[in-house]
Image: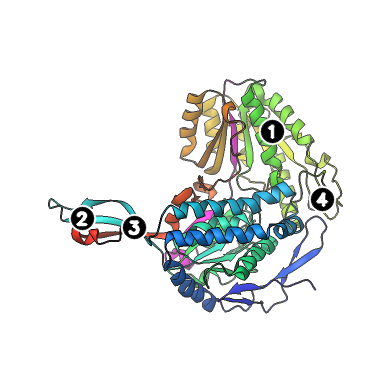
Amino acid sequence: MTELLLNFVAGRWQAGSGAGTPLFDPVLGTELVRVDATGLDLPAAFAFAREQGGAALRALTYRQRASLLAAVVKVLQANRDAYDEIATANSGTVKNDSAVDIDGGIFTLSTYAKLGDSLGDRRFLFDGEAARLGKDPLFQSQHVRVPTRGLALFINAFNFPGWGLWEKAAPALLSGVPVIIKPATATAWLTQRMVRDVVDAGVLPAGALSVICGSSAGLLDQLQAFDVLSFTGSAETAALIRSHPAVAQRSVRVNIEADSLNSALLLPGEDSDSPAFELLVKEVAREMTVKSGQKCTAIRRVLVPEALYAPAAAAISARLAKATVGNPRNEAVRMGALVNRAQLNTVREGLAHLQAQTELLHDGTTHALVDADPAVACCVGPTLLGVRNAAGSDSADRVHDVEVFGPVATLLPYRDLPHALALVRRGQGSLVASLYGSDPAALAAAALELADSHGRVHIISPDVAALQTGHGNVMPQSLHGGPGRAGGGEELGGLRALDFYHRRAAVQASTVVLAALPQD
Ligand code: NAP
């Protein structure tokens, strides 16, 4: 029997009472560890976090909580090698892809440690200036933001077990709100190990951080009015969460990050020799292959002027052909595995679904696996699909509707810019769109056209070719989330992330009373 990972709740490491669900190596097929949350006393676990963890965190100032984040950073850095090994074994990712998750999480924590320090030694935030409520200026309204006196429950997706925890926990803990994390079962090991290291190091107050590995059963039932819930995962699970009584009846604040059909758009006026064309080709090939396309922000739709369809198809395919796929332990391999067999099957089914309306431009099945048994390893080569003409981009409705969560994208030719923008908007709200071109005014105008339907518009012009942070990389300074089918959530964006964990209230009083509110 493999090791059964413990849950950390109510200040103690606790085993579930069931046999456990096994986690596997997606390349070798071996069982790694098991997780189980059966029989945990959830009411006690939630009460401990809410009462003990919440009170301890709220007693600190923003600056003091920022120093807790900095201490967590040190713990994670000290144990980084172990995380790499777990990611290789459980997520099947090559070192660079594991780093996106592990170092991305550490970087996000450090960013919030710095941002939090800038808030100083205070325990609440002013929100704007006081406003007079009548002719006499004595009676005014001052808005304040105070940490919510509940806990934050995170239900996370399998693709970012490291970053997914810390990008949410950093702003929550900085706000003074305790965290219970329920990682996706398939990759729960890395999350559990990171929490274990932080708990063992004793850097956070009791109750500030808990981890529950295994089934989500019963978790939402525990949520109370001042708790918040942050969910990342599929649209189907998101729909269940939205209709749960905690959200529908008890007004638990909820943030949802769901699936998204992100686009890359080459603006009109560029030819196939232009730097902008080359930048698009490079970014698309990179985004399709990083983490085997298992990124919610990955490029799924690539839009080019109709005349550039054939050159773009050839150039992207040529880059994809160089991708070596297989065992991440082999130095020659650039792209590892999908997370498990279920995802491999889902990706294959999704591909077949899209192929019914598209042509195959680069076939992922032509990639022989390096150092991996195709009968066991959940590896798949990158596949580029396309529709031949602009009319096809309109009629191929599936490519605007179905997210294949793997190394798959579709090339879509467009007639003119209005057509291109309309096609991008067929995604019904996305996390990110990237624009490629060399005319600053045209790029800026297109960004504003897409801003209402995207959480982020990433512009790659030749002057920032070497500086740009990547279409799919989520930077803590910028907003992450998107309207519509992307879930309607907002995360990160620097200190904006603290809004979710604070309650805004208007204090209406004499200016003499308002002046008595602590100023620093
Ligand atoms: P999923 O099946 O919806 O699972 C997500 C999480 O929800 C897991 O922790 C899962 O636990 C849990 N869960 C399952 N059923 C639940 C229920 N009835 N009540 C409460 N929680 C429940 O999603 P997935 O297939 O793992 O994730 C892939 C999807 O996530 C993709 O569509 C991707 O686009 C999206 N995603 C979005 C973002 C973003 O930031 N927008 C980031 C990453 C991924 P178990 O694992 O134990 O079932």
Where ligand 1 lies, by image quadrant?
bottom right
Of badges 4 and 1, nearer the viewer stands 4
State the CA–CA distance, disc 2 to disc 3: 20 Å
Q: Which residue is mark 1?
A: 386
Q: Amino acid at mark 3?
A: Asp
Q: Amino acid at mark 4?
A: Asn
Q: Is residue 167 visible?
A: yes
Looking at marks 3 and 4 on the same chain, the residue that comes earlier in the sequence is marked by 4
Q: Which residue is mark 4?
A: 327
Q: Is residue 249 magenta?
A: yes
Q: Which residue is mark 2?
A: 140
305 lies above or below 450 = above
Label 3 crowd (10 A; few <14 / some 14-19 / many >=20): few
Which label is found at residue 520?
A: 3
Q: Which of the pair 366/468 is nearer the observer?
A: 468
442 lies above or below 410 = above
Q: Are marks 4 and 2 in contact (CB under 8 Å)?
A: no
